[in-house]
Image (cartoon, rainbow, N blue to C red):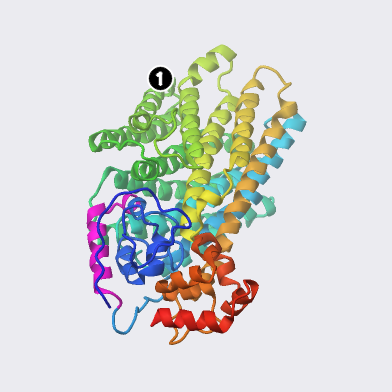
Amino acid sequence: MATISLPILDGPPPAPDSGFTAGSAVTAATMIPDLLRVHPEARAVLDRYGLRGCGGRLGPYETLGFFARAHGVEQDRLMRELAEAVGRGLPAGGLVEEPASVADAIYARFFLAGIVMVLSAGATWGAWLLWNIGLSGSFQANALQSVNAHGMVQISGWVGLFIMGFAYQAFPRFWHTSLAAPRLAVAVFGAMIVGIATQAFGMVAMGDSSLAAIVATAGAGLQAAATATFAAQILATFRRSGARFEPYVGFVTAALAWFVAATIMSGWHTWTTMTAPDEASLVWYVATYQAPLRDLQVHGLALFMILGVSIRMLPALFGAPRVEDRRAWTALGLLTAAVLGEVALFLTYRLTGNHVLAAGLMLPWLMLAAGAALVVLPWRPWRPFPEHDRVCKFVRAAYGWLAVSIAMLALLPAYQAASGLPFSHAYYGAIRHAATVGFVSLMIMGFAAKAVPTLTGVDSRGLSSLWGPFLLVNAGCCLRVVTQTLTDWSPAPYAVIGVSGTMEVAGLAWWGFGIASLILSRRDGEARHDRVAAPAPDRIDGGHHPADVLDWFPETAPVFDRFGLTPLRSAALRRTIGRRVTLNQAARLHGISPEELTLALNDARR
């Protein structure tokens, strides 16, 4: 095979019908599927930097320049290694593919299960509980364990499963290594699903049964074991990679610690509330431990993980400014002290009754605001990101809701003074909703809508803009936060508060069905790529597909042009019609002799 050099050139992205061939220059703007279709030997280089498992055999619809940026590899280095790989050509025995690993698409089961969770016992159940509140005109309308079971499913089944799926898929690729003990991920998934279902069943379905607390706590124990195993896998993967301990890794490591701690505390809190000897004891347990638990889950797990991933990915995905290391490390220290401080001060206040400690909560809340601002302000999310994408609006709105939730938290003492209430459960619940739905859920929706098309090999430019789900979830969250707060001042908002939950569920369902359909279509995409990657035959015959012939023998493209089959220049038509009709069928449709066409193609091949 002749040696082909790859000049390192810059230029505009190739048009969909550019017809990339063996003689085309490979640049930072070259699309990965175009490169791998013509030069499959380049796959090994891209796999080494994290392509494996992304987008099927031909990879995702993204440029080499974007790949280098997203995967943290120097662009010049990547292009040099690609040049060397293509220069060597295919090995004498052909390409030998590594066997598929469970880690290649482990995210899919976690994402799909998370969607099922949020559309069943998560947001949908929460909407039903909210309608009960609205119709009764009281936030005490629902049983405590029903509310807590809904919250547990939202955190473990929605937030937790998506974090796990993303981490298993993305972090090894960030660090240019493979997942440690990948089969453990399957066990972690099973333990999480069984644990969540068991804990929810024990909390709600078993009623006052003496076994209910044991069953629910056993489910929580399964989740604790799963989260500890997951955290150990991610840390072991980082350690084996030899990657530098950057600030975003510090955020991720802290988030893993919060995840394990929050899961253990959730199980303990479930046990104590379900075994409380009387109502007074139950109220005391809830008033003392429920707020610190939510702090660990929201300000610990969710906030730290989202900030860590954002520090790593927003500059790569959207061209946002990079957060300086010193600034990020300072933010990590402030936020860690803030979460530890708000948990410790609240517990000490409740256990001692010292109201000075309650007033001291303002300090960790201000530290929380300062730490988040250090990270987020350089990105200027109130302005469009330098590089537009359909998911940018989710990320920008999510950080807006984070600001709203922190501002409301800082204003809590002033609100209580104005309302005359010693503590407003409605206002505090509105703060939590702004954080969990407005910040966390919108961020999950945005990052999943960005990652899934890449992982399934779908060109996101042809997908929905997602304005419908975006507007529904934001409008629902806004209505919930406002009406819940106003219930402290008037009973009238109860009449519409249930509508907010229905709007959020509708938006999540719209988004969720779209994401699930992309994931479930992956198998079809892999089958198409299998046909592309089939060995080239000794002779072209009339039963072959035009697109396959062009993949095997790019030098036959002028023959198709000469016979008037110019639509095959379009990459989109090659992927569709070009793989559904045979050469004989195409020739007859265009009034061409099939024998003459195949003869000319074989001559060109030789």
x%, y% of residue 82?
27, 64
In the rendered image, residue 393 lying in the magenta stretch gets the answer: no
Report if residue 584 is visible in the image. yes
Disc 1 residue type (three-letter): Val
Residue farthest to the bottom, as pictured? 538
Q: Secondary structure at mark 1?
A: helix
15 relative to 22 in the view: left or right: right
456 relative to 496 in the view: left or right: left
Residue farthest to the right, as pictured? 135
Q: Identify the residue shown where x is 54% and y is 68%.
A: 565
From this view, report whether residue 250 is shown above or below residue 224. above
419 relative to 22 in the view: left or right: right
- Name the residue tied to disc 1: 356
x%, y% of residue 463?
56, 50
- State which region is magenta: 68-90
382 relative to 502 in the view: left or right: left
Q: Quadrant of the N terminus?
A: bottom left
From this view, report whether residue 270 is shown above or below residue 544. above
x%, y% of residue 528?
53, 71
From this view, report whether residue 372 is shown above or below residue 412. below
CA neighbours of label 1 inside 10 A, class few (<14), some (14 to 19), many (20+) = few
Q: Quadrant of the C terminus?
A: bottom left
Q: Nearer the viewer, residue 316 or 408?
A: 316
Q: Nearer the viewer, residue 47 or 411?
A: 47
